[in-house]
């Protein structure tokens, strides 16, 4: 009977040990789901990702990986430099960054969806899923977009 109790306790401890790596992996991953509007045939910025250190210098850029490509357009990652003043705590910094851009096929209207991951230099992973509503003309009252730049 004692052997059974020890065995059960060992199995419970092993189950906890096996579960911990999964929980730790979840703690390092953030997920987000959102939707955006885009015009057919025009580039739409979905996100800008960089790394600014505490002393206001550019750190190593994150790695961006496309998980689910769009069905009705293209997804591009471009590297560039943010203009000074874009980061409030470092107003003079022109930080290195990467932008994720979506461009729908010129004749397409409807919905599209993309998923991508952003992995920081420290190993933190952010998962992004974006539902995109593609229209042939900008919505009434829409302002011109600067979504072609970082």
Image: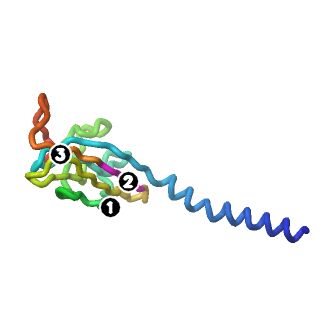
Mark 1 or 3: in front is: 3
Q: Are marks 2 and 1 in contact (CB under 8 Å)?
A: yes
Q: Residue at x 17, y 45 (%)?
A: 134
Q: Nearer the viewer, residue 27 or 138?
A: 138
Find the magenta span and give its range.
125-130
Q: Residue furthest top?
A: 141
How far apart, in angstroms, are the residues tagged by discs 2 and 3? 22 Å
Residue 108: give x, y in percent of width and height: 13, 51
Which element carries disc 2, helix, strand or loop?
strand
Rate crowding at label 1 as few (under 14), some (14 to 19) or many (20 or more) other CA atoms within 10 Å: few
Label 1 residue SS:
strand
Magenta highlight: main SS: strand
Which label sits in the foreground, 2 or 3? 3
Residue under label 3: 134
Q: Which residue is mark 1?
A: 67
Q: Is residue 9 visible?
A: yes
Residue 26 horizontal side relative to residue 57, left or right: right
Q: Earlier in the sequence, mark 2 or mark 1?
A: 1
**Could you tell me which quadrant the N terminus lies in?**
bottom right
To which residue does mark 2 refer?
127
Q: CA distance from mark 2 to mark 1?
A: 9 Å
Examine the image and state in which quarter residue 21 appears.
Answer: bottom right
Left or right, 54 with respect to 135, comes to right
Question: As rendered, which of 89 and 38 lies closer to the eye?
Answer: 38
């Amino acid at each position: 009977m004692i052997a059974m109790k020890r065995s059960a306790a060992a199995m419970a401890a092993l189950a906890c040990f096996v579960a911990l790596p999964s929980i730790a992996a979840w703690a390092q991953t953030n997920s987000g789901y959102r939707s955006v509007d885009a015009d057919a045939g025009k580039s739409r910025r979905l996100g800008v990702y960089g790394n600014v250190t505490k002393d206001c210098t550019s750190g190593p850029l994150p790695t961006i990986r496309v998980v689910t490509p769009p069905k009705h357009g293209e997804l591009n990652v471009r590297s560039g430099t943010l203009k000074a003043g874009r980061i409030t705590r470092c107003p003079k910094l022109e930080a290195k960054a990467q932008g994720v851009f979506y461009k729908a096929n010129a004749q397409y209207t409807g919905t599209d969806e993309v998923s991508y991951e952003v992995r920081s230099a420290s190993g933190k992973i952010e998962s992004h899923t974006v539902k995109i509503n593609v229209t042939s003309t900008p919505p009434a009252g829409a302002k011109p977009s600067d979504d072609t730049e970082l």
